[in-house]
Image: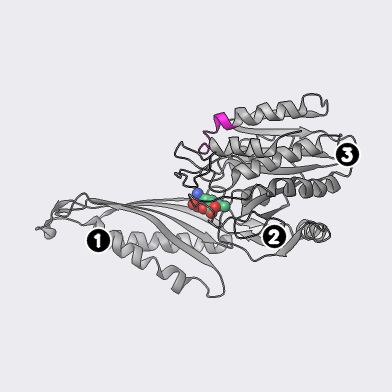
């Protein structure tokens, strides 16, 4: 039987960034191969750093998919745990828990051959390059495309035992924004001979706040956050360029399109009024809103509601993003939050999920997938 705590700690101590998860893939493959070694009904294929494992059903009429993501974040871990990552990257979004749960599910569900096909997707690059979209668009699934797709994300504020989802939108659609104002540098004493990119960026950051307050329907939802701004070199030199890196989050794709349009207009207007060049990149990729399929979500919620160990919560959408949104735009399915009881939030360098969630998750999600694959 797999030692889930040992596996989780190994994965936790060796995180890798999206599409560079080579060691992670190697380690996952070792475990997956040990689990399916004597199962004639199991088959495996890889795509770059991703892995697909198919348990072929005995009387398959459909394919049920389970998805996990495998990448880490560029975060210096500060948990002080004995198995903390020391490589400048961290599983600060819980993907170590996601992967370990998927391995536990694979072990449990491959004990006997399911009736329906069961596909396990270990997907790279959830955080940056929308690996799910890449795999789908590059036909990594081939004829293993699931008919229904399920997946989870850990949620620090919820307790172990909590499973939270809804029958509509669970996560926002996001759009990454990269923007550079290119002006003309100069001496601080001669501003009239320069075009100050830092001042333009300051106006932009202020004006862009009006998208949420003036353009978004007050009954709708949008977030425009710039988390990074770089301009200038020292106090007495006028900045030639200013770089801003941000993200848009909205609960509908229409709102995302509107927000992207207004942001573009504001950036262009400011560049023009300050007489400088603008380089603007909007990167939405696969980060579409995560839309649960109403019927499948309702079935999943009823199932977990009737499981004594599970506290099922009907939850409001969150403004986090997930490239599972892209896969769910192609394949009906459900994503849910799994409570992991950490006092530090997602993406924090102190995020510490409770490992007791592993047994809970494998036990209860396996029951749901067994019901779907009709043993
Ligand atoms: C669950 C979670 O935290 N997801 C990330 C997804 C990032 C999407 C993309 N890189 C962007 O920033 O738009 C999140 O930040 O919500």
Q: Residue 158 carries which label?
A: none
How far is disc 1 from disc 3 in space, using C-alphas?
64 Å
Quadrant for residue 316, please give it: bottom right
Mark 3, ligand 1, within 8 Å: the answer is no
Q: Do the residues under discs 2 and 3 have CB atoms within 8 angstroms?
A: no
At a point 25% along the width and 55% down the height, the residue shown is 276
Q: How many residues crowd around disc 2 within 10 Å: few (fewer than 14), some, or many (20 or more)?
A: many
Residue under label 1, please give it.
199
Q: What stretch is highlighted in magenta?
A: 15-24
Q: How many labels does the image show?
A: 3
**Could you say which is closer to the camera, residue 171 or residue 99?**
99
**Could you say which is closer to the camera, residue 115 or residue 86?**
86
At a point 82% along the width and 48% down the height, the residue shown is 367
How far is disc 2 from disc 1 in space, using C-alphas?
44 Å
In this rendering, the label closer to the viewer, 1 or 3:
3
* Sequence-first tag of 2 and 1: 2
Residue under label 2, please give it.
164
In this rendering, the label closer to the viewer, 2 or 3:
2
Q: List x then y, in percent, for residue 155.
A: 62, 56
Horizontal side of residue 33 vs 93, given as left or right: right
Quadrant for residue 157, please give it: bottom right
Image quadrant for the C terminus? top right
Q: Do the residues under discs 1 and 3 have CB atoms within 8 angstroms?
A: no
* Sequence-first tag of 1 and 3: 3
Horizontal side of residue 3 vs 127, given as left or right: right
Q: How many residues crowd around disc 1 within 10 Å: few (fewer than 14), some, or many (20 or more)?
A: some
Horizontal side of residue 241 vs 338, given as left or right: left
Q: List x then y, in percent, for residue 168.
A: 69, 62
The answer to whether residue 47 of the structure is visible from this angle is no
Q: Residue 115 carries which label?
A: 3
Q: Does the magenta stretch include residue 17?
A: yes
């Amino acid at each position: 039987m797999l030692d889930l705590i040992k596996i989780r700690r190994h994965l936790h101590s060796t995180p890798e960034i999206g599409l560079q998860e080579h060691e992670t893939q190697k380690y996952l493959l070792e475990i997956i191969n040990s689990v399916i070694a004597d199962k004639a009904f199991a088959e495996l294929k890889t795509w770059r750093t991703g892995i697909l494992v198919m348990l072929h059903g005995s009387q398959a009429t459909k394919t049920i998919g389970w998805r996990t993501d495998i990448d880490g974040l560029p975060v210096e871990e500060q948990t002080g745990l004995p198995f903390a990552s020391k490589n400048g990257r961290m599983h600060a979004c819980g993907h170590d828990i996601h992967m370990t749960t998927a391995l536990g599910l694979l072990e449990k569900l491959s004990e006997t051959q399911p009736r329906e096909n069961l596909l396990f997707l270990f997907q790279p690059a959830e955080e940056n390059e929308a690996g799910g979209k890449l795999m789908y668009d590059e036909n990594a699934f081939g004829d293993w495309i699931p008919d229904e797709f399920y997946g989870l994300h850990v949620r620090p504020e919820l307790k172990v035992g909590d499973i939270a989802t809804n029958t509509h939108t669970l996560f926002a659609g996001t759009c990454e924004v990269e923007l550079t104002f290119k002006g003309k540098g100069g001496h601080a004493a001669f501003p009239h001979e320069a075009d100050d990119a830092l001042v333009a960026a300051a106006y932009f950051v202020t004006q862009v706040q009006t998208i949420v307050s003036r353009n978004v329907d007050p009954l709708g939802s949008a977030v425009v956050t710039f988390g990074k701004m770089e301009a200038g070199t020292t106090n007495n030199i006028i900045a030639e360029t200013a770089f801003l890196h941000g993200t848009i989050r909205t609960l509908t794709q229409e709102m995302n399109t509107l927000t992207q349009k207004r942001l573009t207009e504001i950036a262009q207007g400011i560049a023009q009024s300050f007489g400088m060049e603008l380089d603007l990149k909007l990167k939405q990729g696969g980060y579409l809103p995560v839309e649960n399929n109403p019927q499948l979500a309702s079935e999943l919620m009823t199932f977990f509601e009737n499981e004594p160990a599970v506290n099922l919560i009907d939850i409001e959408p969150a403004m986090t993003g997930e490239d599972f949104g892209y896969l769910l735009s192609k394949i009906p399915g459900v994503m849910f939050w799994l409570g992991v009881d950490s006092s530090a939030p997602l993406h924090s360098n102190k995020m510490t999920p409770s490992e007791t969630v592993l047994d809970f998750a494998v036990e209860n999600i396996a029951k749901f997938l067994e019901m779907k694959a009709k043993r």
